[in-house]
């Protein structure tokens, strides 16, 4: 239970609020698809599921020099 209330970042709060808005509008308009979409967004926010279930949205954590192999150091020649 403590896991559900940790690490609340901005996108998680936005996902929860968007789900509440979609579900509220779905209830108002009697649209079951909007209710399901809102419920899914709220569930994703509460249990902290990412939008990309396969982990395809992650970034690499390795530090790699960007132009290490392409840029050669300048060596001034004395004439």
Image (spheres, grey):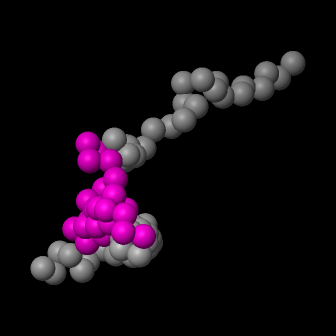
In the shown orientation, is residue 14 left or right of residue 69?
A: left
Q: Which residue is drawn at 26% across and 77% down?
A: 6
Locate residue 21: give its quadrant.
bottom left
| Residue 19 visible from this viewpoint | no
Looking at this view, is 52 or 32 the one in front? 32
Q: Where is residue 62 in the image (x, y as percent from the top left)?
A: 37, 43
Q: Is residue 66 above or below residue 27?
A: above
Q: In which quarter of the image is the C terminus?
A: top right
Q: Where is residue 26 in the image (x, y as percent from the top left)?
A: 38, 69
In this rendering, the count of numbered labels is 0
Q: Is residue 3 above or below residue 52?
A: below
Q: Residue at x 55, y 30 (%)?
A: 68
Q: Give the range drawn in magenta.
A: 29-55
Locate residue 39: give its quadrant.
bottom left
Looking at this view, is 78 or 3 the one in front? 3
Q: In which quarter of the image is the N terminus?
A: bottom left
Q: Where is residue 8 in the image (x, y as percent from the top left)?
A: 34, 75
Q: Position of residue 66 (x, y in %)?
A: 54, 35
Taking the view exactly as shown, the residue that stands out farthest to the left is 1
In the shown orientation, is residue 76 left or right of residue 53?
A: right
């Amino acid at each position: 239970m403590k896991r559900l209330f940790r690490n609340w970042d901005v996108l998680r709060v936005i996902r929860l609020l968007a789900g509440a808005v979609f579900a509220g509008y779905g209830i108002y308009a009697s649209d079951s698809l909007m209710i399901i979409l809102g419920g899914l967004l709220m569930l994703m926010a509460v249990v902290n599921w990412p939008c990309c279930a396969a982990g395809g949205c992650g970034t690499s954590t390795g530090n790699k020099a960007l132009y290490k192999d392409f840029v050669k150091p300048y060596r001034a020649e004395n004439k």
